[in-house]
Every structure is written in C-alpha cells, then in structure tokens.
Image (cartoon, coloured by chain):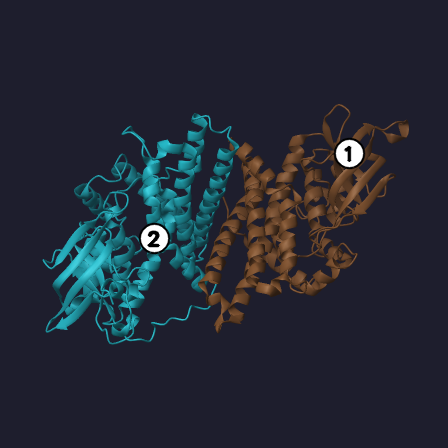
Chain colours: A cyan, B brown
C-alpha cells in the first residue's frame, strides 16, 4: 500500500515537473504553428513522457493513472498547446484501438499516434447518414484477400493531414442496419482515397469530404468484429460529446459577458436598460453553464462519471454559442456585421457564422435532447421502424426523393 | 470553489429526507395546507429539538449548532422537495440571518438562543420596493429604556400570524431606516392573515400602533448581507422544488400511455423534459456555488446571491409550470399535487422581491 500522503506529494512533484517542462517547451508557442512544428512538439512531448499518460506502457503509453493525467491537464491549461491536429487520434481513434483493436494493431499504430508521427481522422458521417449514422451507405465488399471500399464520407476533420483513419462501412446490407457495419483502419495515402476540403458557412474549410473508389483494405485492418462496428462507433461518439462540451472553458469567447459589458461601457450603452437586461441574461446563461462544467469536473475527480450527461454540456454550449453571438450583435449593432480589416474586428461576424456549427457538429441539438431523454432520464425510446428491417429494404437519407421516386 | 456536497452534507440530507417522509408526507402536507394551522407543531418541535435544525447555522455561543450556510441549504432543499409547511425559512433563515448580521451583541445574546432552540418562532418582514414601512419614533418616558415605538404596517410577513418575535424594518424620523425587534404579544400589534396563493407558506399583515420595539441595527449593509444569505437558502429550497417537479413528471411520462405509446417516448414531451433537466443541472450548480460562497468566500457572496436569486426563481417556476402542463388535465385538478408545487414556486419567486429586483441587484453588483 502506498501512503496517501506520499502519493499526494509525488503527484505535486509530477505537476511541478510538467509545468517546468511546458514552460521550457511551450511558452510563446502559437496555437497553430504549422504542421511540422506541431509534429515536432508532439514528438518532444512524447519523449518527455507526457503523451499517453494513462495509456498502457506496452503500446507506448506511460501506464500512469488519472491523477497524473489531471495534473498534466491542470498544468497545461495555462498554455496554448498545438495539439489540435492530433485531437481526433488522441481523443477518439487511439482509445477505440486500445479497447477493441487487435494486438498487432495496437503495436503498430499506438506509439506513432502518441508521438505525432502519424495523424488520425475519423470517418463516420455521410451525406445520407447524419443524425442516423447507422444508415450509412459506404460499402466494403470482400473480394478475395481484401475488402474493397466504395462510397463517400463527410464532415471529417484533419483528413487532409491524416495518415490513417477509422472508417465504418456497410459490410452486410442483408441484415438490420446496426448489425451489418464494420470498422476499418484506412490508409489515407491510398490512391483510391480522395480528400476534398468542404467549405462551410464560415467561408473556411474546417472539414472535408472523402471519396473512396475501389480502396483495397487487408482483413487484418478490421477493428473489432466483422459486422460488429456499431458499438465501437457509439462509444467513440460519446467521447466526442464529452470533450466538445467540457473543453469549452478554454476556448476563446468573443461574445462573452466580460467582453460585451466592456464594449457596451466603452460605447456608453450601459445607460440603456434594454442593453443591461440583455447583459444580465447573458451573464446568467454563461455563468450557469460554466458552473455546471466546473461541477462536472469536480464530480469526475470525485469518481462520479458524467456518462451521457456530457450531452447536457454539449447542448448548453451550443445554445450559449448561438445566443451570445446574437446578443453581441444586438448590443453592438450594425458594426458587428459590417467591419473593416482592423485588428480585432469581425469577431462577432465570425461568431455568428460559427454558432450553427456548434449546434450541429457532434450531434444536433435534437439528437442531444433525445440522448438526455433516453439515457439520462431513462424515458421510453421512440418506436423505431428501422430496427428489424434489413438495411437494403430501408429508406435512407434523401436519395429516393432526389432520384424523383 | 466546491460545487459538490461533503459526506456530512449528504448524510444530513438523507436524515432530513427520511424524517420528512415519516412525519410530513404529501397527505399530511395537504391536510396542514388546507387547515387553519400554519404548520405542524409536532414536526417543527422535533425538527428544532431532535434534529437541532432551527439553530443549524447559529454559532454555539448563541445556542446553535455552529454549522454553515451550506448545511442550511441542504435542509432548505429537502423542505422544498417535500413542500413541508414549516417556519424554518422565516425563523431559522430570515430572522436568524438578520440577528447574526446585525452586529448587536446584546440582541444576539438575548434573542438568538430562543430562535436556535425553536422555543422562539421568529420572522423578518422583508422590505420589498414599493411597500411603505412602519414609522419608528423614540418612545416617551423612562420606562421605555431608550426604546422605540412603531406605528404603521408591515404589508406581508412570512409566518407573521404565528411569530413570537417579529423583526421589522422601519423608517426613523430623520429619514434613515433601522430594523426593530418586536414581541409578537406586545401592545398594539394586530395581525391579519393574508390569502396566499401558496397555502404552505402563510403570511400575515402586521399592524403596529405605538408598539414598543427594540432597535437591532441601522446598517443597510447588515440587512443586505442577511438578505443575501437568505436568498441563497431560498434558492436551495427552490432547487428542491425544481428537482421534485422534474422527477415526478419524468416518472409519469414513463407510465402514462396515449396513442398506444408511453407519452415520454414522444419527442414533443421528451425534448421538453430534456430541457428541464438542463435547467436542473445548471440550477444545482448555481446553488452549490452560492452556498459555498456563503460560507467560504464572503467577497463573492453579493454576486453569487443575486445570481442564485435571479436564476432559481425563474428556473423553479418554469419547471414547475412545465411539469404541471405535461401532466395534462390531471395537473389542473385540486387533487393532484402539481398545483401545490407550481404555487410554491411562484410564491418563492416573489418572496424576496420579484426576479427583476434580483436582476437589478445582480446588474449593480456586476458593475453594469
């Protein structure tokens, strides 16, 4: 048995070492220093022992516990680490491989993922399968010694930089939709894989479309069981929602109460009771959201897992993001949507354009409300007409209508 | 900042909950609410005596248990959930906080031990904007011992008809304001019970006609601090109401069948319940924060209390209303409990002033 005091002392020491390392290697680093610099940082982070802190040592992790991970996260909060491009791999693909991947897959992929040598993406959504991902149509057909993949994915982050990706594809259309899906590791450099940036409503391309044309995949690249890919995908998506909602405290908020009340004061608008009312509303919404996230973090530290309650955070963040941009435009008026190129201008216009993305990505608000109702409150599910019908007999997406049938 | 309960607080919640389940189940709550009784004396005596709750946050030097406002919040949450008609809010929260914050050592020594033991049922006439206060003037004659006399009316006083000790703000001849202590049986006190929407929280109009009164404090800051502490406790009670309203409608949505389906399976119902749950999660976080600030971070209390007051009043009434509505027609009946919670939520929302008053305080304290 370890003396708890010794353990606390060594944790403190661990946190101090992390902080010292970060101060030396991460101070003054821009959040987006370019791909080469980001990879170099990730390699240094790994070599210092701070990547994959809780991941098993035999696959390249550090084999430490949650307390060390939290000590790292706590120290890292004060630094802008250029980890964005590795986020999908570290947060979703890696954990999926560790839980259901084969021994060979873990040995082959985990260490380079942790060291930033190989970047990962996740390919689930399709044009015809958004909220209902299980109705996906991208297919993989066994042809001799390989699976042949054809189809299209969408809303894929970091696909342009990615070396590998986790794909879910239809492997048996003759069974109900959840039962005929398989997960694969895809080599993103395969000539049959085409990645196209998807320009979204912000005018930028945060996501990509991916086209698969006869991509041959070896059977040892199946993750989990053939036709057993759905449960892994569900777990992966839950990770995503928790991280989207709970990471919110660290993201920049151009339309925060603090920023907007300062702006209103500078413009002499605080005399206007309508402006004060809007600011009070925004404060209440923002503060309640932040306090909820702080409470969820304290619960996690106390050993209470948030589970599906991560969806509460995600839903509230989406609403806060949309509403704060809206309130900002009401307070600041026309200048929020017609601005020059001066430093700091255009923030509210960008927030207005980005807002809907928060309410759609990682599950729409309606899907979040379903999850909260079903999994947090334990309400009866809606009768599902597609649970027992073979996939090939289902109506899917909007294709039928588009084909004029 | 601590936003989750301590083990001791969880234990306290459990014992208050089982005590209320045994002694004040819903059938008894309705019986008391519909009778001329303001509350169940036996339950209150046991709460004060056996459980020692009346003096929970009163220092031991004044006969209390010396616990914190976090513990008071725990009790209030349980009382809110159970909808117990109880003088706890008037006596152990409002009046006790005024006496604690007044800074009048003599008054605290004289009056707090009775409040803390439950022997004295005290209340505080919360000053609400727009209400005229009684007028105070120095009492004539040597027998008054430097005391004052009150004339006028306190418009709405929680448990005002039953209180042994009435703390009441009044205007002094020089235009300043002070809080006075009045013995409920003193000369010139008349009490008129009011018709209250919330039958579980009786109120009375109290008239004073040359009533002898003891000056407790003339510090607006002391009154403000006492009201902040009370707003936090009230918010905890509102959280209890909110949580119970949501629990009840979620259970009902799992049982009630229409169109061949459990009503909770319809998205029109499910999504509203999900929204209500989001409100609950945030409301609980706000209450935990405010209760923590009340004990551990006095500098944050003014904003935290105004936040709790602004958030919880609207949140609890909104959820109580939606809970009633989602029950369908049964929710509109007298027989169903939904209206009792709805009315409690509305009454509590206005008890320390309407939401706009809490919001105005919040805006002022945020510097906007």
Q: Position of residue B186 (x, y in %)?
A: 86, 40
The residue where tag 2 is placed is A360
Judging depth in this view, the residue of A160 and A173 nearest the camera is: A173
Q: CA distance from mark 1 to mark 2?
A: 58 Å
The percent position of residue B65, horizontal first and vertical second, equals: 68, 48
B262 sits to left or right of A185: right
Seen in the image, is B330 located left or right of residue A176? right
Residue B192 visible, this angle: yes
> Is A219 situated above or below B98?
below
In the picture of the structure, the residue carrying the numbered disc 1 is B134
Q: Quadrant of the C terminus of chain A?
A: bottom left
Query: In which quarter of the view is residue B178 placed?
Result: top right
Res. A60 in view: no
**Quick check: B278 left or right of A164?**
right
Chain letter for mark 1, please.
B
Rendered position, A27 above or below B159: above
Q: Residue furthest top?
A: B174
Judge by depth and name the residue closer to the eye, A323 or B307: A323
Q: Looking at the image, do the residues carrying marks 1 and 2 touch, with CB atoms under 8 Å apart?
A: no
Tag 1: Cα neighbours inside 10 Å, few (<14), some, or many (≥20)? Answer: many
Residue at position x 69%, y 56% in the image: B51
Neighbor class of circle 2 (other Cα within 10 Å; few <14, some 14-19, many 20+) is: some
Q: Residue at x 39, y 55 (%)?
A: A365
Q: Quadrant of residue A64?
A: bottom left
Considering the image in quadrants, where does the N terminus of chain A appear?
Answer: bottom left
**Direction from residue A247 to residue B114 in the image, left or right:** right
- Comparing labels 1 and 2, the label whose residue is closer to the camera: 2
The residue positioned 78% from the left and 43% from the top of the image is B205
What percent of the width, then of the height, locates residue B267? 44, 62
Residue at left 27%, top 72%?
A391
């Amino acid at each position: 048995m370890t003396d708890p005091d010794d353990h606390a002392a060594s944790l403190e020491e661990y946190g101090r070492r992390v902080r010292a390392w970060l101060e030396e290697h991460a101070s003054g680093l821009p959040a987006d220093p370019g791909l080469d610099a980001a990879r170099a940082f990730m390699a240094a982070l790994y070599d210092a022992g701070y990547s994959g802190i809780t991941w098993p040592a035999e696959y390249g992790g550090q084999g430490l516990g949650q307390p060390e991970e939290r000590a790292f996260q706590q120290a890292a909060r004060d630094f802008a680490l250029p980890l964005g491009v590795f986020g999908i791999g570290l947060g979703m693909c890696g954990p999926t491989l560790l839980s259901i991947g084969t021994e060979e897959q873990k040995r082959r992929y985990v260490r380079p993922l942790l060291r930033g040598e190989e970047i990962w993406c996740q390919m689930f959504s399709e044009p015809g399968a958004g909220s209902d991902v299980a109705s996906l149509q991208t297919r993989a057909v066994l042809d001799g010694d390989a699976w042949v993949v054809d189809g299209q994915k969408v809303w894929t982050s970091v696909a342009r930089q990615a070396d590998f990706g986790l794909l879910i594809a239809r492997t048996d259309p003759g069974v109900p939709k959840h039962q005929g899906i398989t997960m694969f590791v895809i080599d993103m450099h395969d000539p049959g894989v085409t990645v196209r940036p998807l320009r979204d409503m912000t005018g930028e391309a945060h996501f990509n479309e991916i086209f698969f044309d006869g991509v041959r995949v070896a059977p040892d690249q199946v993750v989990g069981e053939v036709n057993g890919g759905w449960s892994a995908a569900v777990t992966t998506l839950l990770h995503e929602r928790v991280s989207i909602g709970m990471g919110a405290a660290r993201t920049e908020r151009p339309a925060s109460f603090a920023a907007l009340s300062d702006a209103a004061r500078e413009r002499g608008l605080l005399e206007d009771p309508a402006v004060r009312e809007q600011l009070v509303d925004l404060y209440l919404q923002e503060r309640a959201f932040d306090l909820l996230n702080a409470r969820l973090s304290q619960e996690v530290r106390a050993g209470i897992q948030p589970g599906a309650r991560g969806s509460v955070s995600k839903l509230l963040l989406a609403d806060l993001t949309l509403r704060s941009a809206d309130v900002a435009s009401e307070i600041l008026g026309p200048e929020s949507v017609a601005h020059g190129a001066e430093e700091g201008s255009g923030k509210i216009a960008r927030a207005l354009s980005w807002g809907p993305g928060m309410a759609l990505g990682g599950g729409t608000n309606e899907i979040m409300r379903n999850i909260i109702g079903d999994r947090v409150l334990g309400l009866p599910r809606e009768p599902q007409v597609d649970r027992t019908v073979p996939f090939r007999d289902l109506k899917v997406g909007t294709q039928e209508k588009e084909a004029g049938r | 900042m601590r936003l989750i309960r301590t083990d001791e607080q969880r234990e306290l919640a459990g014992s208050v909950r089982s005590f209320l389940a045994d002694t004040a189940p819903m059938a008894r709550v309705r019986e008391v609410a519909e009778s001329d009784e303001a509350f169940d004396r036996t339950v209150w005596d046991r709460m004060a005596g056996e459980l020692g709750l009346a003096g929970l946050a009163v220092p031991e030097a004044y006969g209390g248990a010396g616990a914190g406002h976090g513990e008071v919040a725990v009790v209030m949450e349980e009382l809110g959930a159970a909808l117990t008609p109880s003088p706890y809010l008037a006596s152990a929260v409002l009046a006790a906080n005024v006496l604690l914050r007044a800074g009048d050592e003599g008054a605290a020594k004289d009056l707090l031990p009775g409040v803390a033991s439950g022997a004295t049922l005290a209340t505080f006439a919360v000053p609400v904007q727009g209400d005229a206060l009684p007028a105070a003037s120095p009492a004539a004659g040597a027998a008054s011992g430097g005391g004052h006399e009150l004339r006028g009316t306190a418009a709405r006083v929680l448990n005002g008809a039953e209180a042994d000790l009435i703390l009441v703000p009044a205007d002094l001849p020089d235009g300043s304001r002070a809080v006075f202590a009045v013995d409920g049986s003193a000369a010139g006190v008349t009490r008129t019970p009011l018709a209250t929407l919330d039958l579980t929280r009786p109120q009375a109009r109290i008239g004073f006609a040359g009533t002898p009164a003891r000056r407790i404090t003339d510090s607006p800051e002391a009154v403000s601090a006492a009201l902040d502490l009370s707003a936090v406790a009230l918010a905890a009670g509102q959280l209890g109401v909110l949580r119970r309203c949501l629990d009840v409608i979620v259970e009902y949505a799992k049982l009630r069948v229409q169109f061949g389906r459990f009503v909770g399976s319809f998205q029109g119902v499910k999504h509203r319940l999900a929204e209500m749950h989001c409100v609950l999660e945030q409301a609980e976080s706000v209450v935990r924060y405010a209760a923590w600030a009340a004990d551990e971070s006095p500098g944050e209390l003014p904003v935290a209390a105004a936040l709790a007051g602004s958030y919880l009043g609207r949140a609890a009434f909104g959820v109580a209303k939606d809970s009633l509505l989602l029950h369908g027609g049964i929710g509109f009946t007298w027989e169903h409990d939904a209206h009792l919670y709805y009315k409690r939520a509305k009454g509590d929302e206005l008890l320390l002033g309407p939401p706009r008053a809490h919001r105005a305080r919040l805006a002022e304290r945020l510097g906007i």
